[in-house]
Amino acid sequence: MDLLSLYQYFAQFVPIEVLERNHASGAEPDSGAQQLHVDTLSLESDRRLTTISDYLFLGDQDSVLERLRQSDGQLLFVDSDRIDYRSHTDGGVTLSLGVTIAEHYNQSNTDVVSELVIQNRCLETLKFILRCLESDSDESCPSCLHLLDTAEVRFFDARQLNGLIGYTLDFESTGLKD
């Protein structure tokens, strides 16, 4: 699985209208961006989550932070902090990924119950994505991610980004072929 396939894998959880916003109309005609966009939009998926209103994938740190600040509703953010080359894995490549589901909340609000509802909604969405990852990994899908060992879910708290809260799933995977 290359980065383009990885983008498409997580795009299966995102509504089409959200994916349509991810394509910059100023892309170079021969860059492959237009074809990736067309291919991604044409993918059939019964896993699309209507709660997701923004999809961020890797990218320049400043532009990602700006999009996080401006997001509205629930967002799916896929990030990778490293790609390791190891001889014991298929293709020799292990990818460390973080998949975050987060929403904005009113930081001046002292309503603990409302914040808890947001946290629960984000956690349930992330658990759905994890179940799909586990299912795809168990089926030995050649074009899917293959989870290694354990995954960790941690609280995501980004008060500096207009009060984003949610959860991040951190895991390692094989499947990114070199």
Image (cartoon, helix red, strand yellow):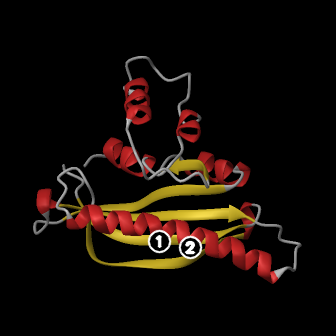
Q: Which residue is mark 1?
A: 127
Q: Is residue 31 above or below residue 172?
A: above
Q: From this viewpoint, is residue 131 visible?
A: yes
Q: Nearer the viewer, residue 99 or 39?
A: 39
Q: Quadrant of residue 155?
A: bottom right
Please state the horizontal and vertical placement of residue 138, each as a whole percent of the image.
Answer: 22, 67
Q: Is residue 103 above or below residue 38?
A: below
Q: Is residue 176 above or below residue 128?
A: above
Few, some or many residues within 10 Å of mark 1 (<14, 14–19, 20+): some
Residue at left 47%, top 71%?
127
**How much space separates mark 1 and mark 2, taking CA atoms?**
6 Å
Q: From this viewpoint, is residue 96 visible?
A: no
Please state the horizontal and vertical placement of residue 1, each as a whole percent of the image.
Answer: 25, 49
Please state the horizontal and vertical placement of residue 101, each as a whole percent of the image.
Answer: 56, 63
Left or right side of 91 for 5: right
Q: Which residue is mark 2?
A: 123
Left or right side of 3 for 76: right
Toward the top, the furthest residue is 29
Few, some or many residues within 10 Å of mark 2 (<14, 14–19, 20+): many
Left or right side of 141 for 126: right
Q: Quadrant of residue 114?
A: bottom right
Residue at left 42%, top 48%?
12
Instruction: Please state which amino acid type lies under the numbered disc 1.
Output: Lys
Residue at left 12%, top 61%?
90
Residue at left 16%, top 61%?
140
Question: Which secondary structure, mark 2?
Answer: helix
Q: Are marks 1 and 2 in contact (CB under 8 Å)?
A: yes
Q: Nearer the viewer, residue 85 or 22?
A: 22
